[in-house]
Each structure stands twice: as C-alpha cells, then as structure tokens.
Amino acid sequence: SVRSAIRKRLIELFTASEQDFVSSQQICDELGCSRTAVWKHIEDLRKEGYEVEAVRRKGYRLLRKPDKISEDEILFGLETELFGRPIYFQEEVASTQLIAHDLVNKGAPHGSLVVSDHQTNGKGRLQRTWHSPNGTGIWMSLILRPEIPLHKAPQMTLLASVAIAEAIAQQTGLSPSIKWPNDILLNGKKVVGILTELKAEADQVHAVIIGPGINVNQTANDFPDELKDVATSLRMELGEKVDRAALIQTIMSTFEKRYDEYMEYGFAPIKQLWESFAMTIGKRIVARTVNGQYAGTALGINDEGVLLLETEGGIQNIYSADIEIKST
C-alpha cells in the first residue's frame, strides 16, 4: 500500500541520517507530502513501536526501532544476491518448514526465505517439537536448490551450522561452538537447532529446506523448566538484546558466501571451518543411532560430512545420531 511505502521511505530517511535530525521540510520534499501528512506518518510509526523524537526547528530523529521483524526490516540493508529474496513473512505460523514445503511445490526459487515471529508448532529433529515463543527468536526456513547428488545433501546442514555460527560471532562477539550435526551452543547450552529436510527422488535433489530455530532475545523465564539447564539465548549470554532483523541479514550474507564457496570448491573449505567451530572433536561421546548406541572418541568428520567415531571395535561412521558428550 501507499501508506506502508511512505513509512518504509521514512524509516530509510531516518536510518540514512543515523543519529542526526531530519527536518520536516526535507521529509516533505522527499515524500512529496504536506507537514500535516508527515506528522500523521510519524504517529503511525510511533504506534508500531518506533521511538521518534521531535524537536522544534530541528525536525525528527529515530531513537529506537521496535524489536520486530518484518519483510521490510529484513530487506532494507540485505546485502545478498539471492538469499532472502523473496521473503515470505507471517506474524504467526504453525511451522515455517510446512510453508517452505508448500512453496517448494509451487516452484519457489533458490534463496526464498520464510520467516515468522511466532511458531505454534515448531518442528525439531526426530519428530520433536521446538519451543518458539512469540517475538523473541528467529524462526525461519531457507529454500535451496543445489545441483548436487543425493549423498551430498547432509553437507548442507553442516554448511548451515557454519554460516549461522559465523554470523552469531560476527554480530555479537560471542564464541559459538557446533555440536554435530546441527546444534549451535554457547557455554555448553543450546542456542540454535537446525532442521534440514529434503525434496528428492532417485539421485536428484529438488530442494533442501534449512530450518534454523534461533533463541535470540528470550530471558530465563521464557524457557519451560525442562529446558532451563540445556537451552540459552543470545541475550542471556550477551547481557543485552540483539537486533533480530540485522542477525537474519548477517546470516543470509554469511550463508550465501559459504554456499557459493561450496558450489565452487566443494566441501573441503566448509569442513575446515566446521571443525574450527566443533566442540565434539577429541571428546568422549556416546552416539545413539537407530541401530543402537556407540561410545568412543570423536575424530572429526570425513569429506562427506559423516562423523568418525573411534570405538574399541575400530572406526565407526555415524550418519545420523543424537550425541551426548561425556564429561571426563
């Protein structure tokens, strides 16, 4: 609508001026509207949670944006070619993965991103539910259409965990670690889970849907009792709130960069990065698989992204498992 286009332009003006005031006249000229109309648009922004200061003879300046994510918030300042273009944003969904599957069937292009502020039925690995409270985290699903053979699809999960760990480090200065295959931890507690799902047949990958759930601005009270000892959020580790839209932008940038690298050079550079973040290497672990459990020392991953576990009976390849790290 015209109204939201004007609001978007107004936010762009404020953002470009950083902390400086923008005069009423400048806003009138840029938006092509009267001072009364400008005032109304500023009031609209305030209702949406933007904090705007007005000073006579100086004009207006933006003091604070609301902690909300929307298509506009993510697109404005997004520095990618394909990732996050287009964005499908909804305030509340059952699960972003379900929407992404539907979009894949409708031919959504590589790089399409589904984002929601609140999931009522978030999905985790192994049919678990994922706790996704309103307005605090990042619940999203990215559609990729890589031309790769089926057996290489698991590498996409490792690529995703590297990209997200990098983005978190870049945005917050925190030091995330990766627990094979797809959990990101801070100080031993889970902050990101990644669900990867495939659309494929025979040896042809049609799409990979990467669904990260990221605990961003939760406080300890937002977690149910059974998660308090095992889960954390960026805010809890950092001691301050994190801009969710900006984090999504950073993830899209690091993800696109690593994806392009992977398509050009293969898995080797990703493997090296993954191992630099990995917390499992050299540790005594128990891997619970569908075929039983194995105990041993994690050696790292092979060139296919499979976990190598040194057990008493020799080296075991672990393709899919729940990992428990044993304290020594």
Image (cartoon, rainbow, N blue to C red):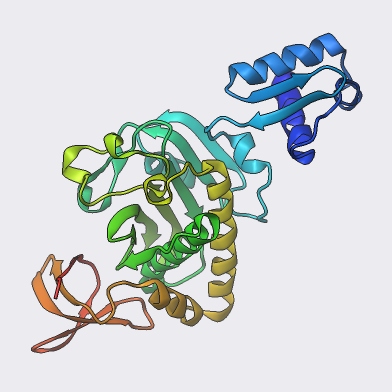
Relative vertical location of residue 289 with respect to residue 76 in this rendering, above or below: below
Residue at (77% x, 13% y) in the render: 39
Relative vertical location of residue 140 with respect to residue 29 in this rendering, above or below: below
Going by the image, does 44 lie left or right of 319? Answer: right
Quarter of the figure that contains the C terminus = bottom left
Count of numbered marks: 0
Residue at (78% x, 40% y) in the render: 16
- Image quadrant assignment for residue 217: top left
- Image quadrant assignment for residue 60: top right
Relative vertical location of residue 263 with respect to residue 51 in this rendering, above or below: below
Relative vertical location of residue 281 with respect to residue 249 in this rendering, above or below: below
Quarter of the figure that contains the N terminus = top right
Residue at (40% x, 70% y) in the render: 155
Going by the image, does 71 lie left or right of 229? Answer: right
Going by the image, does 270 lie left or right of 232? Answer: right
- Image quadrant assignment for residue 46: top right
Residue 110 visible in this rendered orientation of the protein? no
* Residue 133: x %, y % from top left: 34, 34
